[in-house]
Image (spheres, rainbow, N blue to C red):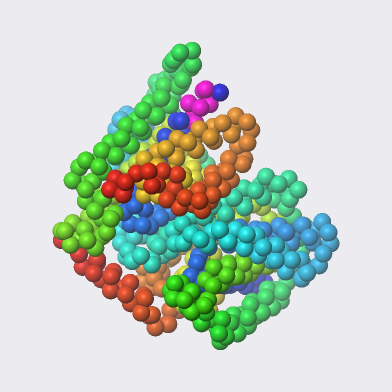
């Protein structure tokens, strides 16, 4: 039981970080559920059909998804905002539909036989990614990412290539999601395509946004809370999705920047806020 | 083959009805409304419920339109009112998605997770008519005619009435519209009411056409309309209609050739390609900015 909690919370934390990495560079992704599916299936095929050990298969699956992520991301990152949202939703839906039509991995029935994830694997992964992100947040790369996120044009004028930075982050996010997906699949033993629908992708983004994307500790907090809330409201068993949806709404309404949002507002967000006040005071 | 194409056009007219709702909201607020598909889904169930209560079909249609419209007001209030800054498109997408989850769960609580059959009295669902040697179900023809009429009315409202002028002004720039004395919140509410009403009616049409209402059409049918909106041209009413009819026909042909499974992928891939090549959509720039709703 406690094992379940550790694995699911850990996997969700890594997934939330996978979105956080993408948000760091100012793009967004509703495709991480799809990348997770790619990771789960690639590593599953490697371990079940080719006997590759899990700790080797997971990074390979991660690289495969990372490559697909970069291929998808390269054109997609030319678009921004709403358009990027639509493109990544499209990727997530397509990945699921493509997996459903591949008979080699069981099609709609799903694919089984993956074993081997222990809570220690997941804890190790969380620690590893956490260390990596801590190092990142102290490195010059963080400032490059900040520059690209806050103002792409002036970042470019300082000699930073925004497309390259965003693409790297997109690939890294896909990699993380796929590695998390492979551990997830090897814990569940059997996976099927409908576990990786668009709902999952949106939830991964929710983990990160609810926790707060201003610093690296927000997404894990969000992931942990959103994974554990359904367990704590057991009394509301039958009403779980409704309660869950309402909790999400309340959290978004009272803390739109996330639970852990303690970075000082930048000039750009202040300008946006002033603009909001201006239009907010407009009625009548 | 021709019958398949006619089926495709009927399907496409329903896609277009939903896509118009997406496109209205996108045009005015620059936000995606992920609860839209669920209001569409609920339209079918409201129709089921009102027919079960003994209401005749016209009353059921009216009730569906009104309840769906009111739900739209709720979605606007909960999911969008607070997230109006240009940077909030992610937050508003997530909040409207959460509303969608609640709607799905509540409708499954009330009507169960299985699909519910819609039975109309009389032979309305099966009656056919012969047009130049083709047998067409009257109901489908009626759906096609009514949805095209609805879309034409919406087009007239947006281009010819004072409400439409206000909508276009807010779409152009909320701040400037406010300076000219337009109540932007009120316009947003009107847009959500109209969009949701059309989604509800589309849900009703789908329920009547297939003969049952089911709680998963929001994610399959409704989400596809989002892609269609992007294909036709975001924020463009005529684009949504043409995109809807185009995809409906292509999908019907794909089913004819046994490619049904890949039809979903095709729509999304088509959308991705369109967004990369022509971010304004297929018909985005063909229409002047003034007409854009």
Q: Nearer the viewer, residue B183 or A4?
A: B183
Residue lying at the far bottom of the rendered structure: A138
Q: Identify which residue is drawn at 41% across, 73% down.
A: A257
Q: Position of residue A218 (x, y in %)?
A: 50, 77
Q: Does the magenta segment cover residue B6?
A: yes
Residue A159 appearing in the image: yes
Q: Main secondary structure of the magenta part?
A: helix
Q: Identify which residue is drawn at 36% across, 53% down.
A: B26
Residue lying at the far right of the rendered structure: A51
Q: Nearer the viewer, residue A276 or B117?
A: A276
Q: Identify which residue is drawn at 25% across, 42% down.
A: B159
Q: Nearer the viewer, residue A163 or B93?
A: A163
Q: Position of residue A183 (x, y in %)?
A: 70, 67
The answer to whether B119 appears left or right of A178 in the picture is left
* Span colored in magenta: B2-8
Q: Identify which residue is drawn at 37% across, 43% down.
A: B286
The answer to whether B222 appears left or right of A21 in the picture is left
Q: Does the magenta segment cover residue A55?
A: no
Question: In which quadrant will I find the N terminus of chain B?
Answer: top right
Q: How many marks?
A: 0
Residue B18 appearing in the image: no
Q: Position of residue A192 (x, y in %)?
A: 66, 52
Q: Nearer the viewer, residue B157 or A237?
A: B157
The answer to whether A190 appears left or right of B165 in the picture is right
B1, above or below B99, in the image: above
Q: Position of residue B225 (x, y in %)?
A: 45, 44
């Amino acid at each position: 039981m406690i094992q379940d909690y550790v694995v699911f919370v850990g996997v969700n934390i890594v997934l939330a970080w996978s979105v956080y990495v993408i948000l760091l560079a100012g793009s967004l992704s509703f495709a991480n559920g799809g990348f997770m599916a790619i990771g789960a299936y690639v590593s599953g095929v490697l371990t079940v059909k080719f006997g590759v050990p899990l700790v080797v298969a997971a990074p390979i699956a991660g690289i495969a998804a990372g490559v697909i992520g970069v291929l998808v991301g390269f054109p997609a990152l030319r678009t921004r905002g709403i358009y990027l949202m639509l493109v990544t939703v499209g990727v997530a839906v397509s990945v699921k539909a493509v997996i459903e039509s591949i008979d080699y991995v069981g099609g709609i029935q799903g694919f089984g036989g993956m074993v081997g994830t222990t809570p220690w694997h997941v804890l190790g992964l969380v620690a590893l990614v956490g260390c990596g992100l801590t190092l990142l947040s102290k490195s010059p790369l963080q400032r490059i990412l900040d520059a690209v996120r806050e103002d792409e044009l002036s970042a470019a004028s300082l000699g930073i290539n925004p497309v390259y930075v965003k693409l790297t982050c997109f690939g890294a996010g896909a990699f993380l999601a796929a590695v998390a997906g492979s551990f997830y699949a090897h814990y569940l033993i059997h996976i099927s395509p409908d576990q990786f629908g668009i709902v999952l992708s949106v939830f991964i983004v929710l983990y990160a946004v609810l926790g707060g994307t201003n610093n690296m500790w927000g997404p894990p907090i969000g992931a942990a809370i959103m994974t554990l809330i359904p367990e704590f409201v057991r009394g509301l068993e039958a009403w779980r999705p409704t309660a869950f949806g309402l909790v999400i709404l309340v959290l978004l309404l009272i803390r739109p920047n996330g639970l852990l949002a303690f970075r000082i507002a930048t000039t750009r967000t202040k300008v946006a806020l002033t603009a909001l006040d201006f239009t907010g005071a407009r009625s009548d | 083959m021709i019958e398949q194409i006619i089926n495709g056009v009927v399907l496409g007219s329903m896609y277009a009805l939903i896509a118009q709702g997406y496109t209205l909201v996108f045009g005015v607020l620059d936000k995606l409304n992920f609860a839209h598909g669920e209001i569409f889904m609920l339209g079918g169930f409201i129709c089921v419920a009102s027919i079960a209560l003994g209401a005749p079909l016209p009353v059921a249609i009216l009730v569906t339109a009104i309840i769906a419209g009111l739900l739209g007001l709720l979605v606007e209030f909960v999911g969008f009112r607070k997230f109006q800054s240009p940077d909030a498109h992610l937050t508003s997408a997530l909040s409207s998605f959460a509303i969608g989850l609640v709607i799905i769960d509540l409708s499954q609580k009330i009507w169960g997770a299985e699909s519910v059959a819609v039975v109309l009295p009389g032979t309305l669902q099966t009656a056919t008519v012969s047009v130049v040697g083709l047998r067409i179900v009257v109901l489908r023809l009626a759906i096609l005619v009514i949805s095209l009429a609805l879309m034409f009315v919406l087009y007239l409202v947006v281009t010819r009435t004072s409400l439409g002028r206000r909508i276009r002004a807010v779409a152009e720039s909320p701040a400037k519209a406010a300076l000219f004395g337009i109540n932007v919140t009120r316009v947003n509410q009107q847009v959500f009411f109209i969009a949701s009403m059309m989604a509800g009616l589309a849900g009703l049409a789908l329920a009547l056409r297939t003969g049952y209402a089911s709680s998963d059409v929001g994610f399959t049918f409704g989400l596809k309309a989002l892609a269609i909106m992007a294909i036709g041209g975001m924020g463009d009413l005529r684009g949504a209609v043409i995109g809807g009819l185009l995809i409906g026909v292509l999908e019907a042909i794909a089913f004819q050739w046994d490619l049904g499974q890949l039809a979903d992928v095709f729509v999304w891939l088509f959308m991705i390609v369109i967004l990369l090549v022509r971010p304004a959509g297929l018909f985005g720039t063909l229409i002047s900015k003034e007409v854009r709703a």
